[in-house]
Image: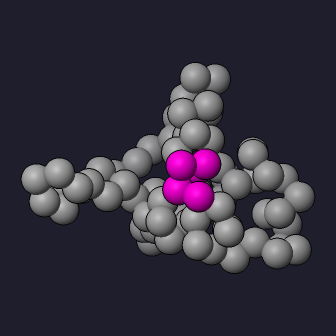
Amino acid sequence: MTDLTLVTYQELAVAWKLSPRTIQRWVQEDERRGIRVPRIRRRLDRHRRVVFLRVSVADALLRRHWPGLSDGNGAA
């Protein structure tokens, strides 16, 4: 069964010790290459939004952009 757990860019940034902007840049780079990165966007209020990724999508993103980190030697 597929894991449907969701995480935000901010949660990933803390877990991976990166900035949310870096994660956003990785997503944009993948989309330019034609790799789909499904996201869920929710509006918190008039001006603030939050973006969620499935954990499996986030893991694939990390594997593509930082392969040495995703093998269990320090991620999270």
Q: Can residue 16 be seen in this view?
A: yes
Q: Residue at x 17, y 51 (%)?
A: 47
Q: Where is residue 4 in the image (x, y as percent from the top left)?
A: 44, 67
Q: Residue at x 47, y 65 (%)?
A: 10
What predominant SS class does the magenta segment belong to? Answer: helix
Q: Is residue 1 visible?
A: no
Q: Position of residue 42 (x, y in %)?
A: 24, 55
Closer to us: 9 or 63: 9
Q: Give the range drawn in magenta.
A: 19-23
Which quadrant holds the C terminus? Answer: bottom right
Q: Residue furthest left?
A: 46
Query: How many marks are shown on the rendered structure?
Result: 0
Please indicate whether residue 38 sits to the left or right of residue 22 in the image. left
Q: Which residue is drawn at 67% across and 68% down?
A: 16
Closer to us: 56 or 12: 12
Indicate yes or no whether the magenta region holds residue 22. yes
Closer to us: 55 or 23: 23
Q: Position of residue 48 (x, y in %)?
A: 23, 55
Q: Which colour scheme is used?
A: one colour
Q: In this view, does 40 lie above or below 13?
A: above
Q: Where is residue 12 in the image (x, y as percent from the top left)?
A: 56, 66
Please indicate whether residue 10 sits to the left or right of residue 18 in the image. left
Quadrant in the picture for residue 15: bottom right
Q: Which residue is drawn at 61% across and 48% down?
A: 22
Indicate yes or no whether the magenta region holds residue 45. no
Please indicate whether residue 10 sits to the left or right of residue 62 in the image. left
